[in-house]
Amino acid sequence: MASCRTSNLDTWCQQLSPTIIGQYSLDGNRQFHDDGRNLARIAVDWNEAHEKEVNFDLNLAMDQVQRKDLNEYFNERLTHVEQWIMRHPECMRPKPDFVTNRYEARILLTLNKPDTLVLHATKVAGTIYLCSAVTLQDRQNMNASEKYLRMGSWGFKFEQFMTAGSDPSTGNNEKESYCLVVRAQLSEHSILYGAEVDGVDNRAPDGLPRSTDLIELKTDRLRPSARKQSMPPYKMCNTWAQCALVGIPRVVCGFRDDRGVVKRLRSFRVANLPSDSKGFFSPGAMVDSLSEFLQWVKTQVEVDSPQAVYELTAPDGSFRCRRLPPTEAEAARFLSRDFVKAM
Ligand code: A3P
Ligand code: MG
Ligand code: MG
């Protein structure tokens, strides 16, 4: 059975074949830096075959937190990948079929709420750029309650607890992030994306991370009576997709009580998440659907021009594509003029 699982992982890795080709950091003002200054080193100092008991109060210094302004966040679109590509033009040889963010790639891989999907697509110099538009759901999240915002900040505070050399009693600047640039291949489609990642194992060597050293951090609700802590299947599915698209092998989850105190840490192998979820999701079917979707997008997004913006939706579960009329397209254009010129 164990060898069967290993060969499944190999199959999905071979199918997506994510290769790390670069990195960048965003500082506390969301300014781009062409380096790995914000790479977090994560201290995993226990035998991961077991759970570890801890007492991490995620409410610490909550009054000093600097949150991302969601509006500003959505307005970023593909800005940072564009900036990275302009500094590393060699990464566009050979030209990828698609460029996007891992955020969009993850949504397309899981498609758990297809009716809320709104993507914009533009073809420039043979490459199709995919970017999510702000949806109704996003607008509702922007008006989130204080309690929802606080719970959102718990996840970032957990990252601070897990990061070597970081002091959780100080306010967190949630705008800071670290991203990898990944090139992947889905059957005949090549795709390049920027992916925010949580960090590497503290023991990893310096330099551009190897995928084997990457760690994804998550929090979830503690089930005090459970023999072993676990995540709900939908979360395993999202986490699997998020990790598989980068080649992240390991997830460390902090299980918190309802007051936001992490009591238990548990490590998961990404390769085991499909079976841990008891078949809730099928990586093979997900990868196949994504590559079919990309094939379909290629047939729809025909005009090669930054002025042509297409809107992709799936109101009833099946995809629709509409070329936006000129005034809507002008408002929806998302690639910077400098970037288009450089391509
Ligand atoms: P959890 O995943 O532990 O809940 P990521 O795990 O993708 O690195 O994200 C880090 C944290 O950002 C999440 O921690 C969560 O707290 C917050 N977060 C991510 N996406 C969010 C969303 N759509 N709404 C609110 N908070 C979000
Ligand atoms: Mg993260
Ligand atoms: Mg995380």
Image (cartoon, rainbow, N blue to C red):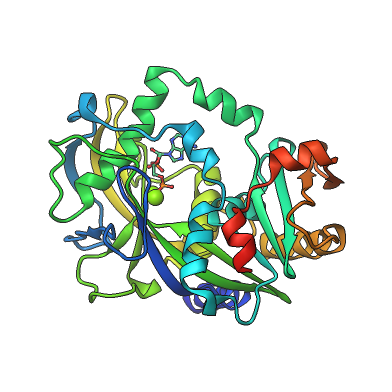
Query: What residue is rendered at 65% in x and 40% in y?
Result: 133
Q: In terms of image quadrants, where is residue 201?
A: bottom left
Q: In terms of image quadrants, where is residue 125?
A: bottom right
299 or 168, nearer to the observer: 299
Q: Is residue 180 above or below residue 26?
A: below
Q: Quadrant of the C terminus?
A: bottom right
State the image coordinates of residue 302 (x, y, percent, origin top left).
Answer: 86, 61
Q: In terms of image quadrants, where is residue 155?
A: top left
State the image coordinates of residue 74 (x, y, percent, origin top left).
Answer: 54, 39
Judge from the rendering whether residue 217 lies leftward or rightward of residue 195; answer left or right: left
Query: What residue is rendered at 34% in x and 33% in y?
Result: 67
Q: Is residue 74 above or below residue 293?
A: above
Judge from the rendering whether residue 174 lies leftward or rightward of residue 100; answer left or right: left
State the image coordinates of residue 273 (x, y, percent, origin top left).
Answer: 49, 58
Q: Is residue 336 above or below residue 59?
A: below
Query: What residue is rendered at 25% in x and 44% in y?
Result: 264
- Residue 114 visible from this viewpoint: no
- Residue 83 visible from this viewpoint: yes
143 or 127, nearer to the observer: 127
